[in-house]
Image (tube, rainbow, N blue to C red):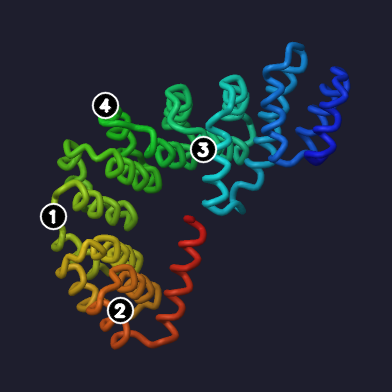
Amino acid sequence: MDDKQFNAILLTGDEGTIVQALRTAEDEGALSLVKPMLALLKHPNKAIVRQAIMSSANLIKTQLVSSWGDIEKNVKDGLATILKRLNPAVVDRIADDLYSKDEENRLRTLQVLGLLGQDEKIKQSVSKMLTDPDERMRATAISILKNMLGHKDITIIYRVIQDPDPRVRANGVETMEAVGNTNVISSLLKMRGDKNNRVRGNVLKALYSLGYKEIAGDLCKMLEDSNKWMRATAGWVLGELGQVQEEPFLDLVGEYGIDRDPDVRQNMIKALMKINNIKSLLYCKYLFPGTEIKQAHAALERMKKFRG
């Protein structure tokens, strides 16, 4: 059912036909029907209002949730503008699926809730998922909360950075950095030796962002590690921090950039491209072959497109 067909039914004013159209639209309609569905929440007929709540929630879940992974970030952000205006009853209906028996549906529902803004009720619903048995739910929940938590919520994150799953810990560190509370520095310092490369990389980036600048020694340890992913992640950190034009970070890329592993070299090239000054571009030109530079550039462009 398309917009034209749905609106034509609304114009008939026949309440039974409208209810049936809502039921049909939730299975066959496009996301563009959400707006006219929500308008029906002001209808004097309570049966139509109830059905509009159920159908709009189901349409969002079936269309948006099922196609979440294929939607580019700029499109997601546009949808967020619409979703933030949702009636609380529709949000509650969507949130019900957090407790679905279908694990993929639960995960996608959690991601959709992340689009709905910083409403306190949504924050509470998402926070409950931090104790979920599924590590993907916990990792996604703390990532979503990054844009919802304030300084007073820091105790929530303290629990997360002790999680046994490295994805949860890594996302928890990102959230700590986003919240910007310098009181967490002492906790982050204890995590510099984490065995997971992504956690360690996020820790060093967060420490620097929060004002603790003595991370060069820890970066060198990562760059000299036998694990290639530890070295590759160090390259990513150098690119992130080198953008603030700190010369020592750029020189570390020059010193360690010619790594024996192609994945590490790719991150080093990306780091130089992110820093994007005369010295970094000269390093890029003279240290690496043109084919690897083109490959890294293409990867950065894809990432920009995905992130919007």
The residue that mark 2 highlights is 259
Dot 4 alpha-carbon crowd within 10 angstroms: few under 14, some 14 to 19, many 20 or more: few
What's the amino acid at mark 2?
Asp
Closer to the chain start, of discs 1 and 4, is: 4
What's the amino acid at mark 3?
Leu
Front one among 50 and 287: 50
Q: Nearer the viewer, mark 4 or mark 3?
A: 3
Q: Nearer the viewer, mark 2 or mark 1?
A: 1
Which type of secondary structure does the marked residue at label 3 adopt? helix
Residue 275 in the image: state x and y as whole percent: 28, 69
The residue that mark 1 highlights is 213
The residue that mark 3 highlights is 115
At x 47% / y 55%, what residue is drawn? Answer: 307
Dot 1 alpha-carbon crowd within 10 angstroms: few under 14, some 14 to 19, many 20 or more: few
Q: Nearer the viewer, mark 2 or mark 4?
A: 4
The residue that mark 4 highlights is 152
What's the amino acid at mark 1?
Lys
Left or right: where does residue 136 sit relative to residue 254? right
Closer to the chain start, of discs 2 and 4, is: 4
Which type of secondary structure does the marked residue at label 4 adopt? helix
